[in-house]
Image: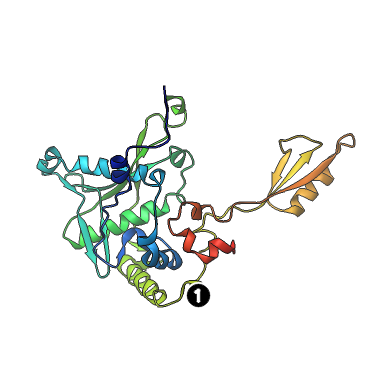
Amino acid sequence: MKILNKVPKKFEKVLKNDNYKKNTKYSVTQLLKEPRAVVLESRYSDKVEYEIEDRLWSFFGTAFHNAMETEDFLKDNSSIIEERLKYSKVSGKFDHYDTETKTLYDFKFTSFWKLVYATEESMKDYQIQLSIYSWLLKQAGFEVENIANVLIFRDWKKTNADKVPKPYATVYHDVLTEIDGLSINKWIDNKIELFDKYMKVEDNQLPYCSEEFRWAEQDKFAVMKNKNKTATRVLETQEEAERYIKKIKDTKNKYWIQERKGNKFKRCEYCSIAQYCNQYKKGEK
């Protein structure tokens, strides 16, 4: 048996092909980002060369959506599939709207750990995205009573069934009528105004992406015992670690503090235009 880490050229071309078209200046997905990311995407996305592994799961997502556009789905009068809606300079394309239950769905290919560690905060972007789609759909004359993400887990195995029973799950959210204290249309208008403003600014003058947006990990301080590889305790600050050691009544062993640097640019590792970002290249927080 001979195994090569490559695929035929035609298959490679199919995988790298991106047919996504938003037909407006901004997409709903971009509204969830910060100005630096959106502006650099607009300037350099055409220059980005993707490796096959970067496009693989996007390709499977596209294939899944194409399957939903089959004749059986299109004949179903209770379903509206993948319609693109517009407002001002923004457009969004939802996956599925059920007219009988008035439920709007968006499908996500993701890790099962997304569900294992799910919190209201970690699902916030999903909720905001669906709420904007819901608002756009309402402007088109449809009622939306429920919004939900159908999560399909690309890394699920039967051995994970104790954590997540199936390789898929549906997560329902409350429909938002406001975002950050603003009506949805006002929030969108503000985002458009913000992005338009920074479209006129040079790359190195763009505001830095925030820690929250970068999924920045905070530094930790591990209390280590002798030459053990596993920490006795991991704390948030140097001072907490020092106080912890002082309270240990153990004179036979040596305790010391190991500083563990958090990855301040975790999200940037998945950002397609990171190579053009001076913040990322300089490692500036």
Residue at the location (42% across, 28% down)? 3
Measured as percent of width and height from the top left, residue 39 is found at: 40, 68
Sort mark 1 into few (<14), some (14-19) or many (20+) by Cα contacts within 10 Å: few
In the displayed structure, does residue 51 sit left or right of residue 69? right
In the displayed structure, does residue 283 sit left or right of residue 9? right
Q: Is residue 243 above or below residue 113?
A: below
Which quadrant of the figure contains the C terminus? bottom right
Residue at the location (47% across, 31% down)? 163
Task: Name the kind of residue labelled 1 in the image.
Answer: Gln
Measured as percent of width and height from the top left, residue 221 is found at: 71, 48
Q: Nearer the viewer, residue 171 or 48?
A: 48
Q: Nearer the viewer, residue 135 or 44?
A: 44
Residue 75 in sight? yes
Q: Nearer the viewer, residue 182 or 254?
A: 254
Q: Is residue 265 above or below residue 6?
A: below
Measured as percent of width and height from the top left, residue 177 is found at: 32, 61
- Please say which color scheme the image uses: rainbow
Seen from this angle, which residue lies furthest right? 251
**So how many labels did they put on this image?**
1
Q: Which residue is mark 1?
A: 205
In the displayed structure, does residue 90 sit left or right of residue 255? left
Q: Nearer the viewer, residue 190 or 243?
A: 190
Residue at the location (39% across, 64% down)? 44
Q: Quadrant of residue 14?
A: top left
Residue 180 in sight? no
